[in-house]
Amino acid sequence: MASEKRQKAIDLSHHLSYVSRARTTSPLKGLSKYMGRPGLISLAGGMPSETYFPFETVSADVLVPDSFTLKETGQESGISWFWKLFARSNKPKTAPVSIPKFPEAPGDVNLAVALQYGTATGIPQLQKFIKDFVDKVYQPAYSDYSILVQTGNTDGWSRVMQTIMNPGEGFLTEEWTYPSAVSASKPFGMHPVPVAMDKDGMSSIDLRKVLSEWDETVRGCRRPHVMYTVPVGQNPCGSTMGATRKKEIYDVCVEYDVIIVEDDPYFFLQQGDYVPKTDRGSESASHLNDEDWLSSLDPSYLKFDYEGRVIRLDTFSKYIAPGSRLGWHTCNPLFAERLERQGETSAQAPCGFGQSLVTQLLMTWKYDGYIRWLHGLAVQYKARRDFFIDCLADEFHFEPSSSEISFWKGCQVFDAYPKQSGKRLFMSEKGLGTKLFSFVPPSSGMFIWIQIHFENHPTYRSRHADEPDERLEMQLWTKIAEAGVLVSPGWFFAADTENPPTDEVEGHFRISFSNSDFESLKKAVHVFSKCTKDFFKA
Amino acid sequence: MASEKRQKAIDLSHHLSYVSRARTTSPLKGLSKYMGRPGLISLAGGMPSETYFPFETVSADVLVPDSFTLKETGQESGISWFWKLFARSNKPKTAPVSIPKFPEAPGDVNLAVALQYGTATGIPQLQKFIKDFVDKVYQPAYSDYSILVQTGNTDGWSRVMQTIMNPGEGFLTEEWTYPSAVSASKPFGMHPVPVAMDKDGMSSIDLRKVLSEWDETVRGCRRPHVMYTVPVGQNPCGSTMGATRKKEIYDVCVEYDVIIVEDDPYFFLQQGDYVPKTDRGSESASHLNDEDWLSSLDPSYLKFDYEGRVIRLDTFSKYIAPGSRLGWHTCNPLFAERLERQGETSAQAPCGFGQSLVTQLLMTWKYDGYIRWLHGLAVQYKARRDFFIDCLADEFHFEPSSSEISFWKGCQVFDAYPKQSGKRLFMSEKGLGTKLFSFVPPSSGMFIWIQIHFENHPTYRSRHADEPDERLEMQLWTKIAEAGVLVSPGWFFAADTENPPTDEVEGHFRISFSNSDFESLKKAVHVFSKCTKDFFKA
């Protein structure tokens, strides 16, 4: 397979920013040819003696890779299993891992190295694990790609932005997107250029349209040469971009010489279509083994990246813990070298405690164990999504419909109406009363994106045109917050907050089903339901 | 004492950079008023469930605070004690610390919080410890200062630079300085403006001269409004700036409205004057208890900062471990808020593994224990400095002299000559032969700064004027490296590498005595001695 791969990516050096070009290689690099020589005594760096590190050993009890079942449990059994696993009387199964100050065998992860000053590329054992993982899981289309650790994808994007973009430039992104990606760019005079979406995520047709019709004099800046995208578990919409669309987008990016920054924290949280509870009973156990599950996932852009124009951002935040502040870039060696220089003058390397503990965990679990762990989490999140939508179905009457709204084009949309008391209807006859909100069940990630039909609110038509439209969104949001449930208001996620994606007046909420226990999720849905119904009565 | 302090710093908002002003508050901040309400269910963030963190407990064996003796041991006993302590048969005394996933009592450091997404201000227990520490140790002159964690002082300076400087601006700094501080600034079009030094560090007279004579048309940029300084254990020169000079510099900065960035990693490594070995015997034990030792240290700029114009950078790199990638800013609340926003779009918070382990260590040691630990390290580094200079004295003949070179003005300089075989001279009659190098024993920090007298090299006078002067420096450097010892070439440390501080042709080395064991230090000095003597014979 390696023989099919290109050995070299094309020359993309013209994408480097002025700032990035001006970064000098650390002068200490000149010393590197001597490093590692047997018997070398280095008096060059400002390194404390390792004997002064107060940590003699760092240890941990870690969950075993198969801690989470692959059975796709239903709602009730989901709860009971969940509580059973974590009840104090029934402690989860753990294994001990330990990191000594000095290695006991060559190649051991050890504190003397991990807690000393290190290179911005990370500790070697972690680099090796990641490289092997990327090879097997993402299968990049060229072989000499580089791996570079960072402190999470927000840092990853910040570094990329400063490495390949100049002040004043725009970057292509989904019309609804991750707010921190936009916040990070604006102070540098960079700005998002929204591209429309449909059910598969960013539209390749609209992308081509934006690029081909770009008029520098009208737009006030050069045609964007960078794209920021969350293709899986799209934040906030929850869509999943498959191989076909990725290839289409990639081809447009080749044609217009665009670098794709693939921010992909939810890759392993692909969940497939939502199947209503009543139709789910029969297939309660996952029929896939780990390998088949992995093959079933929609691939990364790296798989099609024969030119080396993809910078992929991976993070351990969603699979190990956000506090690990650890992730990595996968990209061509030219960009990786510049990103490394930038790392050296910011956080330097990620924290050695985090690096060594995560590395030791992964080396204990091994590749197969980590895949099993990821598979277990994927099943958990699918169960969470299903449970959350089941709870909504308990509170509202759903009608299937379709929508002309960009990000739902081609999807089956669920319209929610107040439920007639006593009846537990699902997908049945036309509902009565007010259409309150609509949504499409997410196919990956952590969020449900809900469109609230404020146009059906009693005060809506009597409101003055000069009143800000989002006021109803924030009014309902506040009502729900006061009742004890926090969701995210939709306006946070507009790529262009001054010119939101549609000229329609509906508001949105992004609701996360990833964190709370099942009982709280159920309670939260009830609070949301009560507040929303009350609000529309007003 | 608190009543003497000003409650508010003066308005310094005009120092904020364009980039910093443009940073928006995270939209999620709007949710913060609801956070922490009892029973709140948050479905707002993209947080994984804590039950999915694979770490159930993280533990460590940590050294006890009095692991390092306060006895100022001589050379031989230093070695033997050192080896005795760390010999495998005589394990160091440790105490266990442990961080559970969920708190067992309110206020416990726990993984559920530390490994979750957190604020860029750090975990509350760490913030509290640091605030108490800063209050007691640095005693800032105003009371409403802020503490903000960062990932080490390189990150700290990078953030500050982007918060209070615009592209094209210069910053005042010592003529020899920390190379990464310069490397971080250059890509943004910022540049160091060197200020001369004397034995107390940066010269207040030269500072005033640079500022008062500033001519924007000649210099091509506005008068600097930022100073970057390493006042203690000045890197690379090793000088220590006392209270008097700091007050002078502070007053000049008030007059010219300059913000002082005090990068102070070596504060607790103040070592006092070097006393030759032969004169040291009598006072082999430190007569200071921890409190008196702390009071004996030259104070931070914070102590004089009645206007809030100091941004102090502290790091755990030299006292816990560089790999902790953890430190903090102490500054006025206005700057702190902007620095926090910048943190949110880069590394977010420092790593939760590192934060929780360091916090648990500090909470176990308590304030008094940590001060004892720092005192122990200070004694260690003093012993290391003394040992290293003793080793040099074994290899070379020293003559006291004085120097007109800026950074040694007013110091007693040691000139080194080849030692006549068999004789062990120290500060005796005029040496014979070639003056090889000069140095001033550092009064703090980790480094000895050595000036090599290449003007006495046989080929020096016959060299062509167009040959780069640094070639002899790099020739000797390479010779020493090839012989198995790495030191840092002096040119790394010139604030302005294109126009080095003097027009003299001598080269320099910065040699670190902080890391290697005593035996290796002795061996390294021998290699340095042999190579240097050989080199000057060539």
Image: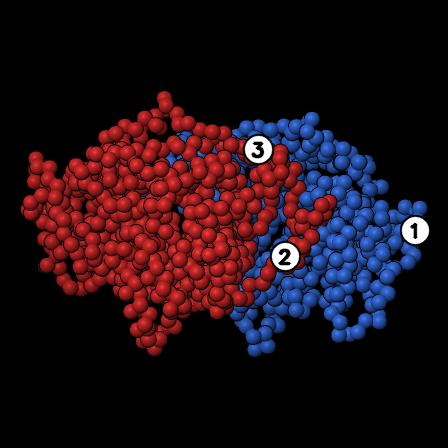
Chain colours: A red, B blue
Q: Is residue A75 above or below residue B226?
A: above
Q: Nearer the viewer, mark 1 or mark 3?
A: 3
- Pointers 1 and 3 within a single chain: no
Point out the residue furthest to the top here.
A89
Q: Nearer the viewer, residue B196 or B322?
A: B322
Residue B420 x, y percent position in the rendering: 92, 51
Read off the chain for label 2. A
In the image, is A347 to the left or to the right of B341?
right
Cα distance in 3D space between marks 2 and 3:
31 Å
User: Which residue does the numbered mark 3 point to in the structure image?
Assistant: A57
Both labels 1 and 2 in a single chain: no
Q: Quadrant of residue B35?
A: top left
Label 2 and label 3 in one chain = yes
Dot 1 corresponds to which residue?
B420
Quadrant of residue A304 within the rendered picture? bottom left
Residue type at mark 3 is: Thr
Residue drawn at x 41%, y 63% as measured from the top left = A259
Give the alpha-carbon distance from disc 1 to disc 2, as whole Å: 38 Å
Find the distance from the CA under tag 1 to the CA under tag 3.
Answer: 49 Å
Observer able to see residue B453: yes
Q: Nearer the viewer, residue A530 or B375?
A: A530
Q: Which mark is residue A87?
A: none
The spot of residue A420 in percent (x, y) is 7, 40
